[in-house]
Image: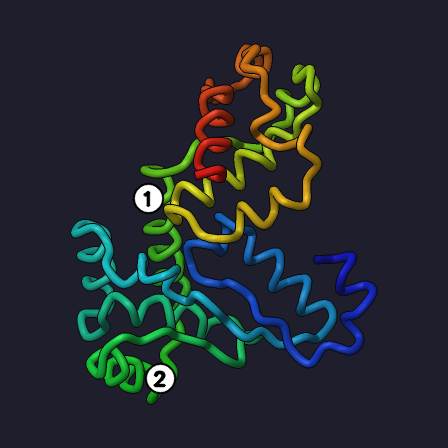
Amino acid sequence: MRRFLAAYGGGMEFCQLQLNYLDWTFQDARGKVELLAEYGIPVWVMEPLGGGRLADLPEESAARLQSLRPDEGIPAWAFRFLQTLPEVVVTLSGMSSPAQLEENIRTFSRERPLDGEEKKALLKVADGLLERRVLPCTACHYCISHCPRGLDIPSLLALYNEHSFSEGGFLAPMALSALPADKQPGACIGCRSCEAVCPQQIKISEAMADFAQKVQS
């Protein structure tokens, strides 16, 4: 993205970006927004509700948010988060019923950006959602020097987490298609040398095999 902006950023009127409070850290959306701000490029948001996953939260998480804003619905929290970001000028929201349309109109009839406490609570909810579904890779890179195939394991695990959490989608397959075959998850030989040095004790070989199977099916 940085290379693209260096080449073409001067001619861009806006950038459409997958952005929501879950992807703020999960997909480093924060870093992308900050990079676009360096070029003065406004953001048009896609997937503000993460494909609908952020419209219906676990009961405990929903109760925590509703205690802070009893008059707000759960989907509205995702939109209020975006209203805290001055770089965001357009939010694209898919709607499948008149009720959803009416709810979005009510939400956007006024701006109510989150305060510091509310934003902290929301990002904590995001952390909780991720803890249940993704591998705890910290990108320490210890594994890379122990991989006889030279795989960029942290990057592959990040794509695996995205693909697993979103239950499919086009992002991971598209990213993998840009890699040579000998750098894709299917190139893992299952030697487990990387697992011997992983501080998080992730079963990397199993993740690579699962990832290769998922993107082929």
Q: Residue at x 40, y 37 (%)?
A: 134
Question: Which amino acid, mark 1?
Answer: Gly
Percent from the top left, x then y, of residue 206?
Answer: 45, 21
Q: Which residue is mark 1?
A: 128
Furthest residue in direction front, as rendered? 217
Classify residue 41 by image quadrant. bottom right
Question: Which amino acid, mark 2?
Answer: Phe
Classify residue 117 by image quadrant. bottom left
Q: Residue at x 33, y 89 (%)?
A: 109
Helix, strand or loop status at disc 2: helix
Please say if 79 is above or below 193.
below
Percent from the top left, x then y, of residue 34?
Answer: 64, 62
**What is the number of the mark on residue 108?**
2
Q: Residue at x 53, y 39 (%)?
A: 158
Q: Nearer the viewer, residue 66 or 107?
A: 107
Percent from the top left, x then y, of residue 174?
Answer: 58, 50
- Left or right: residue 80 versus residue 1 is left
- Left or right: residue 150 versus residue 174 is right
Q: Residue at x 48, y 25 (%)?
A: 209
Q: Earlier in the sequence, mark 1 or mark 2?
A: 2
Label 1 crowd bin: few (<14), some (14–19), many (20+), radius 10 Å: some
